[in-house]
């Protein structure tokens, strides 16, 4: 008999025996009752190291029994934790994420903060943006829990993961804060293997600030350590990031494609679907850089089709941006506008602010090519608002210098080969120390200003509630917004027009239409738009939109106080109240109330 045939028969026999073992295990489980939890759990735990797939089957059986017999939540959490660990051993990261969400749902009901924190630890590698968003609210409390429990390794792991997610969102100051915290803890524990992902993410922050030399330095450190410790999980991400650096900042697309193909070849079995999508996207970008537009479009389109089937919104946005850029370069502006608008809509819904900022200039350029200058101007305003909310390049550089100082001074692995420090180096270290102290004092001053602002907000809210109570005592049978009174020297015609305008708004609620125009109202009142503008300015409003926003803000405030709207997000309530965008809602609300809507709503809910 040929050796290949013999090996095939042996493999088949092993598979049959494994299946038989699992069937026997499952049948045995059916004979256990609820008092045998420890025995069931021990069965799954014993199989974890060598046969994690068997542990997955056993834990599923325990969960089914638990649901039938109403076992305690604490026992169920214990089973899910073991199940999550089994999925991690099989490298099924999507199932690790889903199981972690189940643990947190149960743990929240019984206020088990440690279980919540532990559910975040097994998640690693590239996962889709929506999964990251669902995890974000738990990170800070989880890190604090591990610190309180003196679980340094777990604290460091979560700090590193959280820093990576914040960097992805464009929040570089906080990203650096948590990454440096992780690096410090790993060095204290002499856990060099765990620093690989930290080096990778620090490299990413330098990449975002267009410093390819430092980015490649940290990427290569991560790559060397990944090879040294045979970390197959991070190798694809490291190679992909090196490729991106060559393509985006060093303008070497051919070399980038080499790294992308290497990354694709070392993706471990069971890795998250999103990692392959990112590599596909970067390959298409490299083709685009080479001006191989047909191949770029084909790669983007294949990625878009796959993402649609898998319902991956962030990857859909990435592919749509790529297609839009190629169509723009090939002067197909209508197709470019369609795809970039779809990408922006998805990015905005996912709060991908940093990515959104990079997409908007393309939309503006498309509008200009289509000679739609009004829309181009609106996009420019949107870019300015978004850009002001993100960290400036100068501040990014300052934060990176703090990390560089820590890297040069604190890591023994970096300074062990240094000889005598020269006079120049001493001066440099002293200068960096002074700079670090200055930044610390600046951050402390910012914190003080924030506290002062919070006190002012609370004072303003107190005055508002007192005023509201006084107004309610004088109110007869109306819930409409209070509008500034007409000046005594106004003409009768102007007074009459303003009264008619108020009556129309109060009866028809025209302001609920986000696209409402002055011309529409003027037509209903049989006057000119100019007359509408004049009467509004005569009554203290800067314009038609300002008048509409006054009513819309009052509508939002009423809905905030209505229990029927308590489950809705602020943006949904704003949209139902007539606001056309998130930015206009926030600006108008703070203009008319003096506080932001989130603070106002939380105070209303308290009262």
Image (cartoon, rainbow, N blue to C red):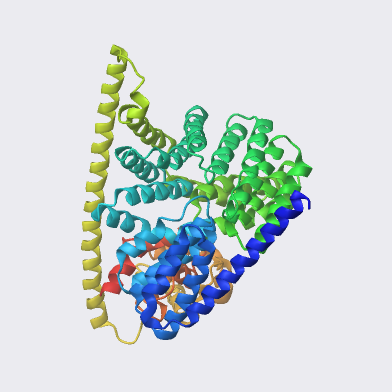
Identify whether 460 is placed above or below 147: below
Residue 593 placement, left or right of 240: left
Identify whether 12 is placed above or below 125: below
Residue 263 placement, left or right of 569: right
Q: Position of residue 590 (x, y in %)?
A: 36, 60
Task: Name the residue rendered at 49%, 66% in the picture.
Answer: 55
Q: Position of residue 26 (x, y in %)?
A: 53, 76
Residue 241 visible, this angle: yes
Task: Name the residue rendered at 61%, 43% in the picture.
Answer: 266
Residue lying at the far front of the rendered structure: 1
Residue lying at the far bottom of the rendered structure: 477
Seen from the viewer's position, the closer of residues 579 and 374 is 579
- Tally of marks: 0
Q: Position of residue 289 (x, y in %)?
A: 69, 36
Task: Name the residue rendered at 25%, 32% in the picture.
Answer: 438
Seen from the viewer's position, the closer of residues 291 and 111 is 111
Q: Position of residue 497 (x, y in %)?
A: 46, 74
Residue 195 placement, left or right of 247: left
Question: Which quarter shows the C terminus?
Answer: bottom left
Residue 416 placement, left or right of 341: left
Residue 373 visible, this angle: no
Q: Quadrant of residue 397?
A: top left
Seen from the viewer's position, the closer of residues 109 and 76 is 76
């Amino acid at each position: 008999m040929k050796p290949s045939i013999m090996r095939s028969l042996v493999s088949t026999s092993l598979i049959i025996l494994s299946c038989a073992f699992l069937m026997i295990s499952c049948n045995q489980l059916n004979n256990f009752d609820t008092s045998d939890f420890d025995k069931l759990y021990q069965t799954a735990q014993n199989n974890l190291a060598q046969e994690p797939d068997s542990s997955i089957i056993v834990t599923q059986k325990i969960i089914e029994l638990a649901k039938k017999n109403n076992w305690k939540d604490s026992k169920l959490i214990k089973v899910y934790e073991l199940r999550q660990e089994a999925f991690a051993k099989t490298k099924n990261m999507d199932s690790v994420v889903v199981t972690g969400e189940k643990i947190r749902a149960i743990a929240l009901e019984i206020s088990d903060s440690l279980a919540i924190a532990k559910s975040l630890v097994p998640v690693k590698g590239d996962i889709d943006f929506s999964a990251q968003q669902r995890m974000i609210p738990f990170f800070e409390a989880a890190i604090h829990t591990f610190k309180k429990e003196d679980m340094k390794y777990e604290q460091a792991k979560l700090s590193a993961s959280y820093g990576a997610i914040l960097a992805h969102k464009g929040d570089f100051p906080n990203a650096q804060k948590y990454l440096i915290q992780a690096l410090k803890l790993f060095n204290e524990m002499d856990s060099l293997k765990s620093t690989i992902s930290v080096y990778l993410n620090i490299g990413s922050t330098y990449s975002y600030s267009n410093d390819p030399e430092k980015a490649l330095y940290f990427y290569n450190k991560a790559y060397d350590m990944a090879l040294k410790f045979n970390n197959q999980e991070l190798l694809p991400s490291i190679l992909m990031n090196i490729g991106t650096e060559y393509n985006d900042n060093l303008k070497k697309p051919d070399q980038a494609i080499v790294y992308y193909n290497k990354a694709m070849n070392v993706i471990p079995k069971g890795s998250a679907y999103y990692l392959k999508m990112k590599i596909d996207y970067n390959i298409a970008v490299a083709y685009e850089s080479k001006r191989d537009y047909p191949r770029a479009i084909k790669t983007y389109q294949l990625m878009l089709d796959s993402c649609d089937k898998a319902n991956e919104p962030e990857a859909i946005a990435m592919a749509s941006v790529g297609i839009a850029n190629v169509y723009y370069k090939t002067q197909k502006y209508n197709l470019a506008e369609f795809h970039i608008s779809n990408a922006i809509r998805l990015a905005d819904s996912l709060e991908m602010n940093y990515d959104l900022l990079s997409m908007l200039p393309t939309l503006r350029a498309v509008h200009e090519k289509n000679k739609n200058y009004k829309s181009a101007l609106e996009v420019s305003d949107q870019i300015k608002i978004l850009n002001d909310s993100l960290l400036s390049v100068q501040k990014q550089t300052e934060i990176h210098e703090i990390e560089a100082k820590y890297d040069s001074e604190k890591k023994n692995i970096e300074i062990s080969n240094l000889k005598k420090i020269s006079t120049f180096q001493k001066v440099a270290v002293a200068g960096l120390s002074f700079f670090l102290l200055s930044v610390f004092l600046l951050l402390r001053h910012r914190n003080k200003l924030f506290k002062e602002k919070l006190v002012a907000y609370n004072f303003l809210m107190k005055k508002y509630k007192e005023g509201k109570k006084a107004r309610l005592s004088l109110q007869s049978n109306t819930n409409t917004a209070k509008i500034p009174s007409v000046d005594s020297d106004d003409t009768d015609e102007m007074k009459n027009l303003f009264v008619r305008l108020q009556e129309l708004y109060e009866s028809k609620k025209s302001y609920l239409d986000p696209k409402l125009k002055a011309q529409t109202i003027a037509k209903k009142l049989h006057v000119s738009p100019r007359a509408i503008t004049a009467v509004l300015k005569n009554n203290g409003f800067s314009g038609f939109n300002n008048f509409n926003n006054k009513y819309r803000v009052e509508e939002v405030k009423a809905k905030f106080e209505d229990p029927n709207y308590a489950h809705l997000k602020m943006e949904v309530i704003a949209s139902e109240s007539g606001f056309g965008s998130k930015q206009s809602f926030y600006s108008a609300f703070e203009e008319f109330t003096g506080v932001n809507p989130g603070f106002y709503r939380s105070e209303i809910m308290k009262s």
